[in-house]
Image: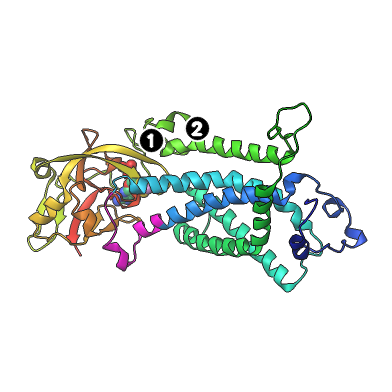
Amino acid sequence: MDPDPSPARRRLDPPLPAPPAALRRGPFRPGAFRSPAHGPRTAVVLGRWLGAALLLCFATGLVSHLLQDPPSWLAGRLPSRPVNGYRLSQGLHVVAGLAAIPLAGAKLWTVYPRLFAWPPARSVLHLLERLSIALLVAAVLLELFTGLLNTLQWYPWPFPFRQTHYWTAWTAVGALLVHLAVKAPEIAAHWRRTRSAPLPAPLPGRPTGRPTERPTERRAVLAATAAAVGAVTLTTAGQSVPWLRSLDLFAPRRPGSGSGTGTDSLPVNRTAAQAGTTAVPADWLLAVDGPGGYRIGLAELRALPQTTAVLPIACVEGWSADARWTGVRLADLLRRAGVPAGSTVRITSLEADGPYRVTEMPAAYADDPLTLLALALDGRPLTPDHGFPARVVAPNRPGVLQTKWVARIEAV
Ligand SMILES: Nc1nc2c(c(=O)[nH]1)N[C@H]1C(S)=C(S)[C@@H](COP(=O)(O)O)O[C@H]1N2
Ligand SMILES: [Mo]
C-alpha cells in the first residue's frame, strides 16, 4: 500500500501479525491487494468527493425537513423568497445523492481489502473505530437506497420513509465525524505528501517542468469514478434542471416532455383517481373561515380579480418544473373573511385521506402576493389531476404542501 510510511504512520499502523496459516489464502494472503488504487491516497481523494456530496445532501435535507415540518420557533421565520429557493435546494439534494451512489461504490471498492486485515481488531479503540465505520457504511447505504427509491416513489419497506431517512442522516453524519477524527492523521499525511512532493529533476536535454506522469491504476480508478458521476448526473439532473431535460434518460419523472400522468407537462404524483377527487360536485363551495367567513363557488372565484404568476412545483421526490398559474390571491380571500395579515392558515383538501390532505401555511406565505388559490394552469382551467377546482401554489414551498382540491381555508 504505502511504500514508505512516515514515522507517525508507522506508530498508528504497526506491522501486523500474520493471520493463522489456515487462513493465509485468498484475500488473507499477504500481498493479496497490491494495486495502488486500494491505497490511502485514493481513499482520501474519493472520501473527499463523497464527503462533499454527503454533506451537501445533509444540509439540503435539513432544509427540506424544516420547510415541510417546521418546529414552532421556526415556522414564523421561514421566508417565502426566493421563489425558487426550495427548488434549488431539493434539486441539489437529489443531484448530490445520486452522484454519491457511484462515489460510495468506488470508495468501498478502494477500502474493502481492509476487511481482511489481521487481526480484525488490535485494541478496544481499534474495534470501536471499525464499528463506527460499519455504522457509517450501513447508514450511508441505507440513505442512498431509500433516497433513490423515494425518487421512484417505491416504498418496499415497512418503516416510514421520511423519519427513517431523517434520523439515519443524523446517524451517518455522527459516524462520519467520528471517522474523520480517527482518520485525521492519515488525511493530514496525505495533504503533506501532496503539497511537498518534490519535482523530479529534469532529464538531460529535455525541457524542464513537471513531466507527464504515467497513468496509474489509481488515476484510472479516479477517472472512471468521475466519469460515472458525470454520466449519472447528466442523465438524471434534467428532472430539475430545465436545460438538461433532453438528456434526462433515467430520472423517473420528466417535466416538460408531457410524459407525466397528467394531461400536460407537469408531472402528477397523486392523481385525482388515487385521491378519490375525480367527481367534484357541481355545487362545490370553498369555505373560507374567519370572523366574516363565507362560502364561494367557482364562478364567483373566477369573477374576482385574478393574478398570474410563474411558480415552480418542486417535489421532494426530486423533480421540479415551472408553471404559469392563474387564480385569486390567497391574501385577498383571507382579508375578505376578516382574517388579519400575519395569521397562520390551515388549508384542507377535499381528499378523504392522505398525508397531504391538510397543510398549515405560515403567515409569510399566506400573505405573499404571489401565493394563489390557483384556478388555471398554463392558461387552461385546472384538470382533476392538478387539483380542480382549486389548488394552492406558494413561492419557495415544497411540492407536498401545494395542496390540491382545496375545500377549506381557515386561520389557526
Ligand atoms: N391534496 C393533495 N395535494 C397534493 C398532493 C396530495 O397528495 N394531496 N400531492 C402533493 C405533491 S407531493 C406534489 S409534488 C404536488 C404535485 O402537483 P401536480 O400534481 O399538480 O404536479 O401536489 C401536491 N398536492
Ligand atoms: Mo411531491
Q: Look at label 2 and name its amino acid.
A: Leu
What kind of element bears circle 2?
A: loop
Q: Quadrant of residue 363?
A: bottom left
Reply above or below: 36 against 142: above
Left or right for 225, reference 352? right
The image quadrant that residue 232 belongs to is: top right
Count of numbered circles in the view? 2
> Please, which residue is most extreme toward the right here?
21
Instruction: Pinpoint residue 22: horizontal percent, then vertical percent.
Output: 91, 59
Q: Which residue does the image show at 47% across and 57% down from the upper left?
A: 161
Q: Residue at x 48, y 56 (%)?
A: 58
Q: Amino acid at mark 1?
A: Pro
Q: Is mark 2 within 8 Å of ligand 1?
A: no
Residue 11, can we see it?
yes
Magenta extent: 63-81
Instruction: Pick the residue in front: 217 or 207.
Output: 207
**Helix, strand, or loop for circle 1?**
loop
**Mark found first going from the N terminus, 2 or 1:** 2
Q: Is residue 71 covered in magenta?
A: yes
Q: Which mark is residue 269?
A: none
Residue in the image at 74% along x and 48% along y: 38
271 part of magenta stretch:
no
Q: Report the residue marked by disc 2.
A: 249
Please give the label number shown on residue 255.
Answer: 1
Whole-percent x and y of residue 344? Answer: 21, 61
* CB-based contact (under 8 Å), mark 2 and mark 1: no
Residue 251 on image: x %, y %: 48, 38
Depth check: give the residue in front, 76 or 326.
76
Image position, residue 3 (x, y; %): 80, 50
